[in-house]
Amino acid sequence: MTPMVGVFLPAREALLNGTSITELLDFAAQAEAAGFDSVWTGDSLLATPIPEPLTLLSAVAARTTRVTIGTAALLPVLRNPITLAHTLATLDRLANGRLALALGSGFSLPANRAEFEAVGAPFDQRVGRLLETAEIWRRLWTGARVTFTGRYWTLNDISIAPTPQQAGGPPLWLATGTAAGARRAGERFDGILPYPPTAEQYRELTTTMHAAAGNADRDSDRITPALMVTVAINDDPEQAGIELDHYVRNFYGFSSDAVSLLQACYAGPLDGCVDWLRSYWNAGARHILLRIGNLDPTMQLSIATRVLDKIQQGLSSERLWPVIGGGAA
């Protein structure tokens, strides 16, 4: 088994530094050529300026042929579930079955609450609405006519066309950092995308996910344990820390010290980064999503490729990615 490695498109960064959005398509094509397994983009309507993800991924699908294209994370509750099911089915067709969807419920911050309010989605219902949306999608994506009565939506004998290229629809991952979310991922989803600050916290979440899958009589080996990380690479650890802080402050408006308490962040030399990623591999991560802590898209791709190459070098002489601190999870 080998780790899958993906990279985030610098979509928000393009708006921050005035880069043309069309250059994101070049980035995706170059990432595919460099050997990445997947490319990803985030989602926000009002809280954080970023290109609309499904429109962007449609263009990326046309510029690539191999890589998985995905959202990390899509906020489905900001949209109508039936129209979104149709959009996603069409996108999966355009991508020839290469779409994956990590879904999020939104952070409990004033700006995030405001965007839910703007579209008439009650923020305190966001988890229940997300779960019901996923259920509606899966029923519609079979191609059958669907009658459904839920807590939030009612469907009366409807169907959509086209259905997705992938039978049953794209894999749905749950982006979560809580034990309750890990249980939901095990019970209902095709993957889990946490980003905890430590590998031990990651292990706790995946252990919870596996146990929940077993209790639900699901094969947990078919649930993808993914990981989102933000890294700043520099041989000078102090300079790397400065670069990470600059990036995070521009991206979130908070210091890297604050964000690192909640998210998996690394600042330092390349070798140290790969060792740090291995600790998450040991804890069960199998698809790593790299977000590079640099506002320059060209530098992002260069740095991400260096990380990918270093991981691949470790694979060249071993059947498994080298592990530290014990056997692979």
Image (tube, rainbow, N blue to C red):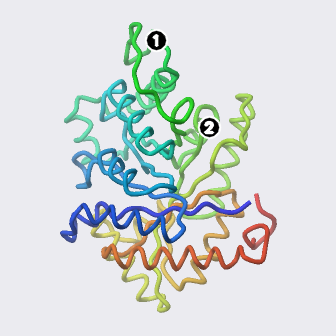
- Disc 1 is placed on an element classified as loop
- Disc 2 is placed on an element classified as helix
Q: How far across and down, in percent of the image, does residue 54 sit?
A: 33, 44
Task: Give the label on residue 145, or none.
Answer: 1
**In this rendering, which labeled residue sits more in front, label 2 or label 1?**
1
Q: Which quadrant of the figure contains the C terminus?
A: bottom right
Vertical arrangement, residue 308 with respect to residue 88, above or below: below
Q: How far across and down, in percent of the image, does residue 321 sit?
A: 72, 69
Residue sitting nearer the eye, 107 or 59: 59
**For mark 1, does the 10 Å Cα neighbourhood hold few (<14), some (14 to 19), or many (20 or more) residues?**
some
Task: Give the label on residue 183, or none.
Answer: 2
What separation in Å lies between label 2 and label 1 (alpha carbons)?
Answer: 30 Å
Vertical arrangement, residue 82 with respect to residue 63, above or below: above
Residue sitting nearer the eye, 233 or 91: 91
Residue sitting nearer the eye, 17 or 327: 17
Tell me which numbered mark, 2 or 1, is placed earlier along the sequence: 1
Q: Residue at x 37, y 29 (%)?
A: 86
Q: Residue at x 39, y 44 (%)?
A: 74
Q: Residue at x 42, y 33 (%)?
A: 89
Vertical arrangement, residue 182 with respect to residue 120, above or below: below
Is 26 left, or right, of 164 in this rendering?
A: left
Q: How far across and down, in percent of the image, does residue 28 sit?
A: 40, 63
Vertical arrangement, residue 26 with respect to residue 128, above or below: below
